[in-house]
Image (spheres, coloured by chain):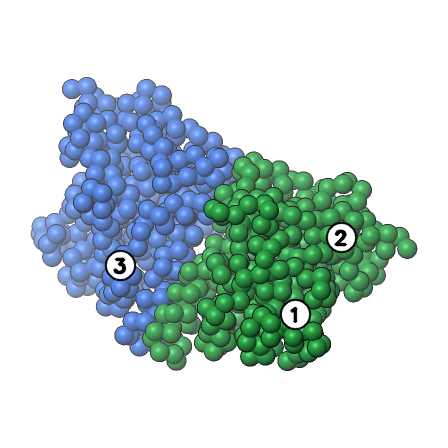
Chain colours: A blue, B green
Amino acid sequence: MTPETVLHAGPPIAWERMSGPMRGAIVGALIYEGRATAWEDAERLVARGAVRFDPCHHHATVGPMAGATTASMPVFVVENRTAGNCAYSTINEGLGKVLRYGAYSSDVIDRLRWFRDVLGPAFGEAIRRAGGVDLRALIGQAVQMGDECHNRNRAASALLIKALAPEIAALELPAKERSRVLAFAASNEHLFLNLGMAACKAALDAAHGIADSTIVTAMARNGTDFGIRVGGLGDRWFTGPAQLPQGLYFPGFGAGDANPDIGDSTITETVGLGGFSMAAAPAIVRVVGGRPEDAIAATEAMYEITWSESSAYQIPALGFRGTPLGIDCREVVHTGVLPFVNTGIAHREPGIGQIGAGLVKPPMEAFVAAARGLAG
Amino acid sequence: MTPETVLHAGPPIAWERMSGPMRGAIVGALIYEGRATAWEDAERLVARGAVRFDPCHHHATVGPMAGATTASMPVFVVENRTAGNCAYSTINEGLGKVLRYGAYSSDVIDRLRWFRDVLGPAFGEAIRRAGGVDLRALIGQAVQMGDECHNRNRAASALLIKALAPEIAALELPAKERSRVLAFAASNEHLFLNLGMAACKAALDAAHGIADSTIVTAMARNGTDFGIRVGGLGDRWFTGPAQLPQGLYFPGFGAGDANPDIGDSTITETVGLGGFSMAAAPAIVRVVGGRPEDAIAATEAMYEITWSESSAYQIPALGFRGTPLGIDCREVVHTGVLPFVNTGIAHREPGIGQIGAGLVKPPMEAFVAAARGLAG
């Protein structure tokens, strides 16, 4: 990571091929860093090669939607204590006009600066005083509380607040700032998303770099391409075109406004949460569409393409069966069953933000390419 | 309420017929109030008629297990804004050695004094600053997060903390006390229970006193008797013997140690939560026994004896069907289907506390007596 770098979601991509929301988020990140003042300014910086783009995944980092991450953004550090590696993620901004959906207006930038100056340091100190937070246990609880930890993080976020509030309440900050930190946390039902993603990344990185492994260790989208990495295939990405989600739109928007699938948040599906664990979160159909029985069926299908079941995450509605674990890229190809992904939907133009949520299928060609890579 | 009064759970009962945990809690309450120093002392007070016993229910109050409530205990005030009435409940003490399960040792009393001096005033001020907490909305969310709000309050308690933490963090208390308030809250997965009970009581009291109504407006147990009140039958209680729960015991305890069913917490079942909403809380079978499909079946059976379905509380696993609402005492008699109750289990001796949790059926004779009361 350098001051010139902007990390982004998904596999590598150049500015020219980036979608609207990805460009919007990058412009916002450059304004936030004080490197540009407006869109044209940022574009000039990019044009003269002053911005280095790199996937979050190449820095043990994951970011939802555009995933724009720059040097002065505070990040959570998630430790895989068994394997010894770490993963990182920024602080989730909530819904509405937010950087990750491609918005870059001054309120978006002001919020990020408050994250840098107040919220990030407050969370950091609280987490250190608490001696860390056991995210595996927290996710395990949340999965029994109706979350699938991708598009439903209501329980996980509340549990995180519960864990940190005693420390935040004792911080040496003005009373108003202590209150604001907890009010922001309480207002954000996706507070936990980025942390959960980093937990998934920390788990999956430990499964990466194992000779001959056919297990998918990352699925990620940059808004143009969908890509996967496989345990035994090093740092190569196997890609196909990012697809358009099918879902429910906010009033005034429709499928014609949607950007193709974007974000590193499919790291949750890669570990068997998100769309793979919809059976644990029947209420999510109110957000992504479908009926509760579709949520059950989605999870049941995912056992077809996974090798194992989690011992840490169990689904009460399936008799406490463990969540599907370990996608085998060959099984995806052999069975024709594609990973089940749920997702937020960004407007395809920069500056607008979220317009809905839904379900999306990855392109089969990414899995076919990986299976060929293994055979070669 | 007077300084001499000790409120207790369930229908009216004299000291002589009270069970062990009920007596233990009352002795503890008298020690807490400074009216006695030990068991013998408290017994003498009772013997000379210096203690007035009255059911919580006669004071718009509900208390879990023994329900011992005295004049200097801080209470939550739950307002039914539609009907204009209020209901009250003390602060939940958590698990382990606690007054409501009949423990009365000095740590139990010390905790209650901290409630009176610090926790109660802190919660009170935070709730006032927050402009109150919408409990109906909170319960509605919790029911979609795996709680049935009787023996599973994990989500509701976390949501309550989330609502109050921003205010508590700004209270003019020493940092250590602010932290202790939130740490206590976070440690208590039943923090919400008493509040939820008061919300049920506030709702049901509005359905009481309606001519010819056959709807059950309270079910409550004092550890000896189980009693119900019915909308059209005034303040009379219709009783039968409290039954022994069937459930899971903590290591070292068994059915022979169990006290018969005790507590006002069946107010949750009376409103259609608790055992009536087990389908929303499949993970509860780990606490009370059975399988997730038994939880679904329990809720489905309860639609047989209720008149309506809640519009505020919906169960995702049943396609967002409303929770069963409005027990008709005649339907219980006609169908032979008894209300489904889940419960904590107290040791039958005073001073010990909780020994397990399980399921219990009310005695049919209480419903038969009420149905006869309606016919007469």
* Residue visible at 40% across and 77% down in the picture: B171
Nearest to the eye among marks 1 and 3: give it. Answer: 1
Where disc 1 sits, the SS reads strand
Q: Amino acid at mark 2?
A: Gly
Q: Nearer the viewer, mark 2 or mark 3?
A: 2
Q: Which of the 4 quarters of the picture holds residue A112?
A: bottom left
Q: Which residue is mark 3?
A: A131
* Chain ID at mark 2: B
Decide which of B232, B27 is in the foreground and name it: B27
Disc marking residue B81? none
Circle 1 Cα neighbour tier, 10 Å, few/some/many (<14 / 14–19 / ≥20): many
Q: List the residue tagged with mark 2.
A: B240
The tag earlier along the polypeptide, 2 or 1, is: 1
Q: For the C terminus of chain A, which image quadrant?
A: top left
Secondary structure state at the residue bearing disc 3 = loop
Q: Position of residue B77 (x, y in %)?
A: 59, 71
Residue A195 in sight = yes
Are the residues flagged by discs 2 and 1 in contact, CB closer than 8 Å? no
State the image coordinates of residue A338 (x, y, percent, origin top left): 35, 28
Residue type (three-letter) at the residue carrying disc 1: Leu
Where is residue B187? Give x, y as percent. 42, 60
Residue B7 badge: 1
Secondary structure beneath dot 2 equals strand
